[in-house]
Image: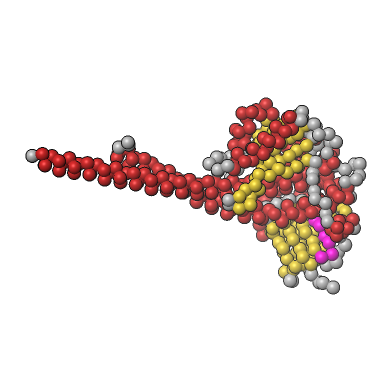
Amino acid sequence: MADTFQFDLVSPERRLASVQATRVQIPGSEGDFTAMPNHAPFLTTLRPGFVTVTAEGQVSEYLVTGGFAEVTPEAASVLAERALPRGEVNAEVMAEIEAEAQAAFDSAPEEGRTAAAQRLRDVQALTARLRG
Amino acid sequence: MPSLKDLKVRIESVKSTRKITKAMQMVAAAKLRRAQEAAENARPYAERMRAVLGNLAASVQASPTAPKLLAGTGRDETHLIVVATSERGLAGGFNAAIVKIARYQIDKLVAEGKTVKILTIGKKGREMLRRDHGKRLVGHVDLSEVKRVGYENAAEIARRITDMYNNGEFDVCTLYFSRFQSVISQIPTERRLIPAEFEAPEGEAGQAAANYEYEPDEEAILADLLPRGLATEIFAALLENAASEQGARMSAMDNATRNAGEMIDRLTIEYNRSRQAAITKELIEIISGAEAL
């Protein structure tokens, strides 16, 4: 049994990571989950949060604002709308993301209201955690 | 026959033109490298997106509640033609080639009695289409202020198109752009955006798709992903277009530089001949003058 699997993190503009990982923690829209080798095929949308990748004993974190993840027994890929390595995340970036979520909420149509509100709450929780 | 001075002035003028085209060629080469890199970086995302959407679409297709973006409106009356061109000219046949296939399609649709609406991205396409399809233009996306096309630009365009679609302003949407193959070859391409079109996943992949677990359910994911897929397609097209534009400009300017060089050679020969002729003429005059004495 393989103890690593292929993990890819891509955003529309670039490929942020492509490694043999042992475990990857992903913030799914209906709950965080950890992908490990031989995970059942799984597809989920993401909520704003951190993707934590463990590869070769190294742990790296990436901020994602949304998108989706596809997990198969051999590989996992995260297609993020926007992704940043942990090191590039600062108060400024978070403020920008929060403002975007706020704007999306303000202009959300009736049926998308709950989703936009949820997203805004997620972003705010994230900012609070980072400040914490 | 032009005088010596005229020739000299012309040679100088062609020389400065050559300097300009040469500089433009080098700028285009540098920009091309960057544009190509951007297009390549965006490829993995677009590929995964297509694969996942293809899988999802295949499993939802049959359902009567499939999202409209995928299933279409069931009609084929009003077409939205999105023409992506560049903001600047001097890029050889780049813009003309895209507009040509778009125009062909527009004429065909009009002849079939369909309603055609045109959305242009980039100034050049708008200028070319305004002449004979002015009243069909419904909108324009101005990217002249944008230095580097970002995903946000594409997402914005996608939002605009989706809004129009949801308001029932069109049934079918097709995008025209130029695919970058190499510096000397850019292929004008059409791609249908709405209803979304996917290649059916092949045997094995199709089987695997059936076993996926979805969170939230398939249709909710699809509803979330389709607008994103649309933005991704547009983004990919814009990047291909940017690379093609620079490639086309580079080869056009290379040609122009070469032509200018040839012209300078020709004019220089003419100049030297005329100068020699003038000298000979003077000599003959002096000699015959001396003989006459």
The segment highlighted magenta reads: A69-74
Q: Residue at x 69, y 48 (%)?
A: B236
Nearer-the-camera pick, B223 or B119 = B119
Residue at the farthest top position: B135
Inspect this view and state whether residue B45 appears. yes
Nearer-the-camera pick, A98 or A128 = A98
Nearer-the-camera pick, A18 or A126 = A18
Q: Residue B163: give x, y in percent of width and height.
A: 76, 36
Q: Residue B118: give x, y in percent of width and height.
A: 69, 33
The answer to which image quadrant residue A55 occupies is bottom right
Q: Residue at x 73, y 66 (%)?
A: A19
Is residue A71 within the magenta segment? yes
Left-right relation of B271 to B104: left
Inspect this view and state whether residue A28 appears. no
Q: Residue A118: give x, y in percent of width and height.
A: 82, 46
Q: Residue at x 80, y 48 (%)?
A: B198
